[in-house]
Amino acid sequence: MVQAPQATIGDSEFDRDTALIRRDEGVYDIDLSAGWTIFDAVNGGYLLAVLGRALADALPHADPFTVTAHYLTASRPGPAVVRADVVRTGRTLSTGQASLFQRDEDGREVERIRVLASYGDLDTLPDDVRTTAEPPAMPPVEQCFGAEDGPAPVPGSSAIADRLLLRLDPSTLGWALGAPSGKGEMRAWFGLADGRDPDPLALLLAVDALPPTAFELGLSGWVPTVELTVHVRCRPAPGPLRVSVTTRNLAGGFLEEDAEVWDSADRLVAQSRQLARVRLG
C-alpha cells in the first residue's frame, strides 16, 4: 500500500482529531472534526475512538478489550462533551462507561452515543492461539481500488475518505458498477492516509470504515448504526490492515455486519458485530 510520509502514533491527524481536553475528573471537551464525516454525520468508528480515548484516560488500564456502543442520535461536527465513569477496577480488567453529549439548536444537551467497555493490558496476554479463522482471501493491494479510481464524489459527501487509505477488493465492488452481487460482503485494505501505524484505538475506527454491505445487497443510502460491539484481540503489527465485513441476514429493516480485522502478521486483531438500520424501497 502506497503511503504518505510516515506519521507516528500520537502525532497524526487521527490523534489530533480524537484528542480530548480534560475539564474535570471524568469530564472531557472535544471539537468533533468535520474531517471524519459522511455527508454531515460523524462516522461511528471515529466517535468510538473518541470515547475509547476518554476511557483509556479514566480507567487504570489503557487498552480496550471489549467496547459496546449504542448510537442514540446522529453526531455533528463541532463542540461536544464526554463524561466517563469507572464502574469497576480489577487486577487484569477495568470496566467503565462513557457518553458523548452535544447541544441541539435550542441549546439543550443531547446524548449522542453511550458506551460500556472493559479495558486491560494487551501486552500481558499469552501467545497461545488456537483458531480456525483465516485471513480473508484478497488480491494484492495494487489490484484493489480506492476512491480515486471512481467518479468524482458529491462535494462534502465523504470527507472521511480523504483521511483513509482504503483499497476495496474488486469482487465486492459490483454496487459501484450498478451490478451488486447480492452477497452482502465488503473487503478492503485499510490504513490512515498519513501513514500512521494502527493501534488499538485505530482498530475501533477500522471496523466501521468500509462502505456498508447493504450496497452489495442492492440497497443505497445511509445505513445508520444502532449498536456496535468491538473485541480487540491483540495489539496490531505495523503496516496495513485487512478488513472483511459480511451480512448474513437483513430482516425487518435491520441488518447485522460482522467484521474481522487482520494485521500484517496475519493475526486476527479485532472483531465486531453491529446492528444497523436500512431504508427499503
Image: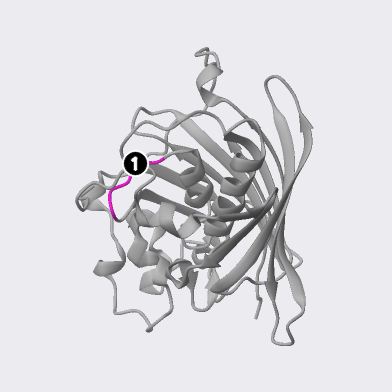
Residue 123 is left or right of residue 100, and the answer is: left
Q: Residues within 10 Å of mark 1 (few under 14, many from 20)?
A: some
Residue displayed at 38% across by 51% down:
188
Looking at the figure, which quarter contains the C terminus?
bottom right
Residue displayed at 65% across by 31% down:
60
Residue 26 is left or right of residue 7, and the answer is: right
Q: Is residue 133 above or below residue 86?
A: above
Q: Quadrant of residue 59?
A: top right
Q: Quadrant of residue 280?
A: bottom right
Instruction: Choose between 52 and 160: the one closer to the eye.
Output: 52
Residue 75 is left or right of residue 182, and the answer is: right
Q: Secondary structure at mark 1?
A: loop
Residue displayed at 62% across by 71% down:
75
Residue 12 appears anywhere in the view: yes
Q: Is residue 126 above or below residue 62?
A: above
Which residue in the protein does label 1 denote? 197
Q: Residue furthest bottom?
A: 106
Q: Residue furthest right?
A: 87
State the extent of the magenta-drawn residues as a range.
194-198
Residue displayed at 43% across by 78% down:
157
Residue 220 appears anywhere in the view: no
Looking at the rendered structure, the kind of residue marked 1 is: Asp
Expressed as whole percent of the image width and height from the top left, the position of residue 34 reads: 46, 72
Instruction: Choose between 4 and 188: the one closer to the eye.
Output: 4
Number of numbered tags placed on the structure image: 1
User: Is residue 54 a member of the stretch shown in magenta?
Assistant: no
